[in-house]
Amino acid sequence: MMTTPTIYGIANCDTIRKTRKWLDAHHIAYDFVDLREQLPSPSKLSLWLDCVGVEQLVNRRSTTWRNLADAERKALESGHAQRVLLAHPTLIKRPLLELGNEIVVGFFADHYQQQFNV
């Protein structure tokens, strides 16, 4: 039996909408967590950082990134990413898919097809 995947993101994000539409079209049940409404725990965020690293986890194309103070950008690079991401959860690249022990950042239909055997 496959574990129900959890998708983390922001409900009004275009990529999240595309991801959810793809999952729904393939009849894949999933849990959705809106990062604006429910922050990840520090331990979960630490796990994500350990699994994929700060470079892959931080959305450097976001409005949040463009508005981020230089000191916070430096903190991301100097090992304080967890603190900055908890303060600014919209910096987390979307979607973040948790499926068992695997973490996938971003939506790629071909990867999802492989992941879900569809």
Image: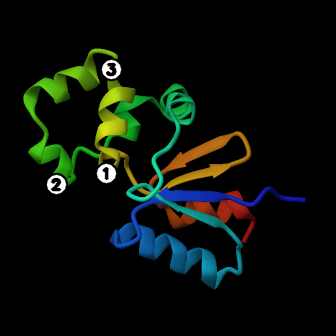
- Residue neighbourhood size for the residue with mark 2, other residues' Cα within 10 Å, grouped as few (<14), some (14–19), many (≥20): few
Residue type at the position of mark 2: Thr
Q: Residue at x 12, y 24 (%)?
A: 71
Residue type at the position of mark 3: His
Q: Distance between the residues labelled 2 and 1?
A: 9 Å
Of the two numbered discs 2 and 3 on the same chain, state the one appearing first in sequence: 2
Residue type at the position of mark 1: Thr
Q: Which residue is drawn at 61% across and 74% down?
A: 23
Of the two numbered discs 2 and 1 on the same chain, state the one appearing first in sequence: 2
Q: Distance between the residues labelled 3 and 1?
A: 16 Å
Residue 2: percent from left, percent from top: 83, 58
Q: Name the residue under label 2.
A: 63
Q: Name the residue under label 1.
A: 90
- Residue neighbourhood size for the residue with mark 3, other residues' Cα within 10 Å, grouped as few (<14), some (14–19), many (≥20): some
Left or right of 66: which side holds 5? right
Q: Is 21 placed above or below 40 here? A: below
Residue farthest to the right, as pictured? 1
Under circle 3, the secondary element is loop
Question: Mark 1 and mark 3 in contact (Cβ < 8 Å)?
Answer: no
Q: Is 104 placed above or below 47 here? A: below
Under circle 2, the secondary element is helix
Q: Quadrant of the C terminus?
A: bottom right
Residue farthest to the top, as pictured? 78
